[in-house]
Image: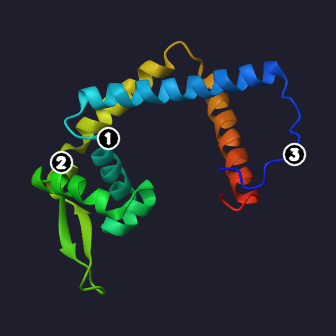
Amino acid sequence: MIKDPPKAAPQPDPREIEEALEFSTLLQEFGRLLSGEYDRRMPMSRSGSQILGLLMERDGRTQTELAEDMGIHKVSVGPHVDELEKSGLVERRPHPTDRRSKQIWLTDYFHSVKFLGQGVFTMIHARAKEGISPDDYAHALKVLSRMRDNVKALKEETGGA
């Protein structure tokens, strides 16, 4: 929602509009293709995979912390953690300082099978990079990182609104 729209916005250059749409569409399609290919090959939801990835970065997070890191409501995380727990990949343990809270921990079983998911991920990544030189790939990552940082700065300039 635009809080204070300008009285008379300048007409954007049609080429800039076309370029922005092409860029946005390409990123969305690429993201959908990557996610779809991973989902097709993995026996768990994308959210389940995301939770496991977050726990690999820092094990023992609470459900609230996982929800914040995923950008979703903490109630939405519960069913995914339940499924991962039933699969033996995570376990809930009492929080050492907050009796109302539980921490989510990766299990030994997870650590014994994590290479399977990592293998799928790296195979898809390798296929995506086919025909692209290492220098071009490194440059693409640098450009995308810069663009991400530019958009983050724009969000900060507007107070996150």
Q: Tell whether 28 sits left or right of 155.
A: left
From the image, state whether disc 3 or disc 1 is nearer to you: 3
User: With respect to residue 140, does 62 lie above or below?
Assistant: below
Q: Earlier in the sequence, mark 3 or mark 2?
A: 3
Where's the C terminus, which quadrant?
Answer: bottom right
Label 1 packing within 10 angstroms: few (<14), some (14-19), many (20+): some
User: With respect to residue 55, does 12 lie above or below?
Assistant: above
Place of residue 102 in the rendered image (x, y in percent of width and height, measured from the top left): 24, 74
Residue indicated by mark 2: 112
Residue indicated by mark 1: 46
Question: Decide: marks 1, 2 in contact (CB < 8 A)?
Answer: no
Label 3 packing within 10 angstroms: few (<14), some (14-19), many (20+): few
Image quadrant in which you'd find residue 75 = bottom left
Residue at the (24%, 52%) spot, across then down:
80
Residue indicated by mark 3: 7
Residue at the (73%, 53%) spot, across then down:
153
Image quadrant in which you'd find residue 85 = bottom left
